[in-house]
Amino acid sequence: MPKVTYRQHDGSEETLEVRAGTSLMLGALTGGVEGIEAECGGSCMCATCHVYVDEAWLDKLPKVQVLEDEMLDDTASERKPNSRLSCQIEMSDALDGIVVELPESQI
Amino acid sequence: MATDEAAGLVVIGGSHAGHQVAIAARAAGFEGPVTVLSDERELPYQRPPLSKAYLMGKQPREALLFRPAAFYEEQGIDLRLGVSATAIDRAAHTVTCDNGTVLSYRKLVIATGTRVRPLTVPGSDLVGVHYIRTLADIDAMLAELDRVKSVVVIGGGFIGLEGAAALKTMGRDVAVVELADRLMTRGVGKTVSTFYADHHRSQGVDVRLSTGVERLEGENGQVTGVILSGGETLPADMVIVGIGVLPNQEIAEEAGVDCANGIIVDENTQTSDPDILAVGDCAQFEGRFYDGSLRLESVQNATDQARTAGATVSGEKKPYDSAPWFWSDQFDLKLQMTGITVGYDTEVIRGDVAAGEFSVFYFKGDTWLGTDTVNQPANHIASRRLLDAGYALSQAEAADEGLALKELVKAARKGG
């Protein structure tokens, strides 16, 4: 199973296996990773599953769609060029090893 | 009277609002035991996907859970599943449960939500008649679905229409019967209602407006059809009822806590008894977004009120004052709503209704009440932020396609 590393704002890391087809948001929640709220349950409606994607992986991700782009303008922590909503990133074998950093706050 | 532990926080209800109160209380530093009672046997789970992705088999069961069981243990949250609270003794500060347990509380939060309004016409208890509220409701539907060809949805609100869209997408013949002369009357204005009726029809859904249901007919106890007010019969192997919900406020009422259409709370979610709070679908409150008191059935309201309650029980103040927002996914359309727009007199439209990308700004006189958007998320987000900021959007600004609302948000934030 492909692996994801979630890096907390304080620098601590957890690496989890996340099944292909599962979102990075869900992988974090079901894996007990803190720092993701995901109020809307992955409907791309709330911007509380914000992550900063490690630069090396950015190009491998599907492009930001209009809805996600708008929601990213509404994140609690600063939007950066590598900001994504983790509910919109589906795990795949190609993303095995991806590293995402959690923002200081989601709300 | 025996108590089984030291008095702490007791939360009645383990859905969106209930589980979030416990998490928010821990986040706010609440010390002492935290107990959540849920009358369902599942770990707290997301309800919105029930009528959409879960029904369509796109979201597996485990993906509905908010958190794994271990999370609650780590947080020191004692989650008691399959347990109902039956009575509150305010003088003794105790809650009695249906399993005989008596819990002492320092603070009690009622997050009992709502229950479906039952269909009462003859035939309502036939096999094949379903409601969309709990995971168990959907599992019961899914267990029958293989042999279902025709579905009649009674009620053209969000839940019914989402169910209709899902089942149509799954290849069933679907009809929607609505008593009012338009769809989603409580949530959206006329333009949006008409657009959705047209869209459902274009997808092959048989939408009947201004139509009542006389009775359901069946054979051998199984529903076979819906007899409409005009006498016509619609064939149905399955009937889905989505005619609204009723607040579960009885436990508060019986304890003498003030209730109306819901349990009455203030901006800190405290009831008429300051040691008892209420949050989510069962709570009625007043605020700056609506002239009068209201009860909201939404994820946003549940989550935000729960955070307020978590702060309140921990001795902090975090008054509830966020602009209401809602969403509904039907077919490939994203409907997003913000504000409370009932009672509007003017609609100002941006975008292209026929193309399915538009926004409707609602006004009562000169006062902007809120906005519905269809596939225009930017206007939704900006409207939410403008409402939060207390910005008085004018009809001229709303109508000006060249004016990006995002710019107004920046200005409003700078000014505020």
Image: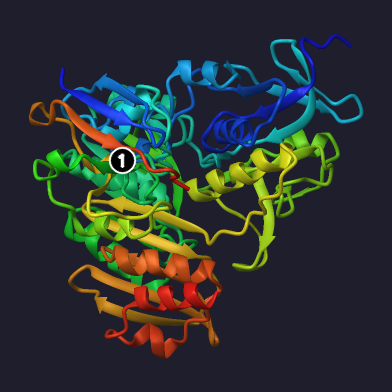
Please say if B29 is above or below B205: above
Left/right placement of residue B150 relative to residue A104 reads left
Please say if A59 is above or below B27: below
Quadrant containing the C terminus of chain B is bottom right
Q: Does the rendering let one see residue B341?
A: no
Q: Residue at x 29, y 57 (%)?
A: B334
Query: In which quarter of the view is residue B103 placed?
Result: top right
Front residue of A21/B244: it is A21
Q: Residues within 10 Å of mark 1 (few under 14, many from 20)?
A: many
Give the letter of the chain under mark 1.
B
Please say if A105 is above or below A65: above
Q: Residue at x 40, y 23 (%)?
A: A32
Query: In which quarter of the view is residue A52 placed?
Result: top left
- Residue that badge 1 annotates: B52
Left/right placement of residue B331 relative to residue B126 reads left
> Secondary structure beneath disc 1?
loop
Front residue of B34/B356: it is B34
Left/right placement of residue B154 relative to residue B52 reads right
Left/right placement of residue B362 relative to residue B88 reads left
